[in-house]
Amino acid sequence: MARRPLHFRLSGLRERALLDEASLDANAGTFSGDQSLSYWTRRARPGAASPSSPSSSLPGDSLAAMEARVRQRHQQLYGTRRQSQAPDKGTPANTTAGQAATDGGARSMAGLSAPRLVTLPAPPFAVRMLNRLSYGATPASINEFNALGGNDRQRLANYVDWQLDWDAINDAALDARLAQAGYTTLGKPLAQMWNDHTKNDPEYAVRIRPGNEVQRAAFVRAVHSRRQLREVLANFWHDHFNVLGTDYSVGSVHAHYDREVIRAHAKGNFRTMLEEVAKSTAMLYYLDNINNSRSGPNENFARELLELHTLGAENYLGFMDPFRVPPCPEDPSYPIGYTDVDVYETAAAFTGWSAKNGHWQFPTENDGTFVYRQSWHDAGPKFLLGMTLTPEQPAMKDGRDVLDRLASHPRVAKFICGKLIRRFVGDTPSQPLVDSAAAIFRAHWQHPNQIEITLRHILTSEDMINGWGQKNRRPFEAVVAAMRALGQTWTLRLDHDKSNEFMWRMGFTGHVPYNWPAPNGYPDTGIAWSGSNSFAMTWKLVNWLTETKEGDAFLSPIIDATRSGVATWTASNLVTFWCNRILGYQPEAGRKQTLINFMAQNGDPASYVITDTDAWAASDLKRHYNHQRLRSMVSLILMSPEFMSR
């Protein structure tokens, strides 16, 4: 799962000597000569791919002969290293791929004790839904939600329909906010972005600016966008197809990846999205497919395509014979999982997928856009994921055949739907919902709105309607929800001291957007964020938001909001107002009383009127630094389990 180094198996004089010694039997499609040749070295030999008679639709007897050739090649290349065997025929139909592999090939996860779930009383329906479908309920969004129908189910369905039709939602105010704050790269075409931020090796601050802008814009969009579901979904896909946005090679084009790959396809077709990810300059650099060629093959992208983007590690079978992989119970025409050989063959299928980056062989091509280099492609026959790819296929067809196979695979449907359910519903997705969503996902795998159709099923399901308290807010989500609840109007931006301080503090939480270095993206379960550092650093930042000024003005207009919202400043009234504003409801009586007692100090909570002052009065705590105590009380609500759950 970690980012892997380049996989050159042999190099220099030794490799050339071995290539010279080996010879290809064109009739048998196999190598003779030194049998110690590695898999990659054999594939790299020019002309070693296959006879040049191209055909993607061979007759049955020819296809059988081709499969026999590939099987023979697999035996020669991998036979001596095979350890895993196919499971017995008696393996239960619901056995996972990880279970199907033997100990020699399967991965195992470290066992963790199951956390004890403590569920708080459920908030009102609108609050429960908005805290999962948006970056936090606000008084305005609660009113919007409740106006969308005559009952809860109708309101939810209408809200989901409204938010999924996000192109029809006017977000001009957000666009204006970003423009006024000096964001200049978010809309640049790729070629211009490449010219301005990569070509001619500009200074680091210029080069990395698109990545930094996307990173900070994530906060602005999450707080201020009217297209809330789009923002939640965009960040889900960013985690799923993770690239390190501040990587030296990725940062200069990250705005294109965010805009044209993730956001443009967030609710569309998964197969289309897969190809756009594979062709994107950001991913080509991040997982090294930029230089994947038959003379220098690299498996990084191929492995993460199978392990993270589609089938998932739970369907990994290790290094076993791909011809002996059991059929998938949901559809026997597909294998139950993938092997290491599938990874190698997938890498070969994507050789030649690159970008115009001024490579020494093509120095005049240097605009950062995708290019397919036929001369780099391994055009030989391949067997992967239970299918045979014939030699000399048309340009890019090997890779596209792989993507078709993955996008239509039943286990891919379950993997993707499980992650969507985990994001929106709960840390432990119910199997019936995973199965029903996967059936819809797979049935529509060629539909242009496949993801939207599947999401509508998940987001209006009984699990969604009845669930609560099975997700915790991760640090990013807690911080932007706090900014929304506090009514902040300042805009995070580059070249700004207060924004820089905010980002520095955010870094200690471990959840700066698009800053996860490994390809698997930020974890999405409560246990992953349950450490004391994660909570403490998030609470410190939330408290900072309530206390910090820029110039003479506080970032959070707590005092002004209280003045306009609370007529009589008793401790009870103040706590009630801010619980409604931040949580959308009142916590249970005992927990609320703790806040009231803090606000009241030695005054009567129901009758004593707290003055609108911030004077020192240590001998009478009910009069002592009233504004500061009010801001601290607001901060305590933001740190509460009620606020941190969703």
Image: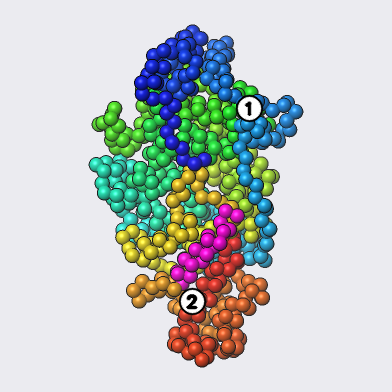
Going 67% across and 48% down the picture, which residue do you hit?
430
Q: Where residue 577 appears, x then y in whole percent?
A: 55, 76
Q: Is residue 22 above or below residue 328?
A: above
Q: Secondary structure at mark 1?
A: loop
Q: Tell me the amino acid under the disc marked 1.
A: Ser
- Dominant SS of magenta comes to helix
Going 33% across and 49% down the picture, which residue do you hit?
208
Residue on which the image places disc 2: 631
Quadrant holding the C terminus: bottom right
Magenta stretch, residue numbers: 527-546
Instruction: Name, please, the residue furthest toward the bottom.
Output: 619
Q: Where residue 399 appears, x then y in whole percent?
A: 47, 28
Q: Which residue occupies the foreground of this view, 226 or 371?
A: 371
Disc tally is 2
Q: Which is more foreground, mark 2 or mark 1? A: 1
Q: Is residue 515 above or below residue 475?
A: above
Instruction: Name, please, the residue furthest toward the right.
Output: 90
Q: Secondary structure at mark 2?
A: helix
Going 47% across and 32% down the picture, which residue do you hit?
299
Q: Where residue 534 appears, x then y in whole percent?
A: 53, 60
Tell me if residue 529 is in the magenta stretch: yes
Q: Is residue 203 above or below residue 276?
A: below
| Mark 2 surroundings within 10 Å by alpha-carbon count, few (fewer than 14), some (14 through 19), many (20 or more) | some
Q: CA distance from mark 2 to mark 1?
A: 62 Å
Tell me if residue 503 is in the magenta stretch: no
Q: Which residue occupies the foreground of this view, 529 or 59?
A: 529
Q: Tell me the amino acid under the disc marked 2.
A: Arg
Q: Which residue occupies the foreground of this view, 596 or 154?
A: 596
Going 62% across and 43% down the picture, which residue do you hit?
109
- Of the two numbered discs 2 and 1 on the same chain, state the one appearing first in sequence: 1
Q: Which label belongs to residue 84?
A: 1
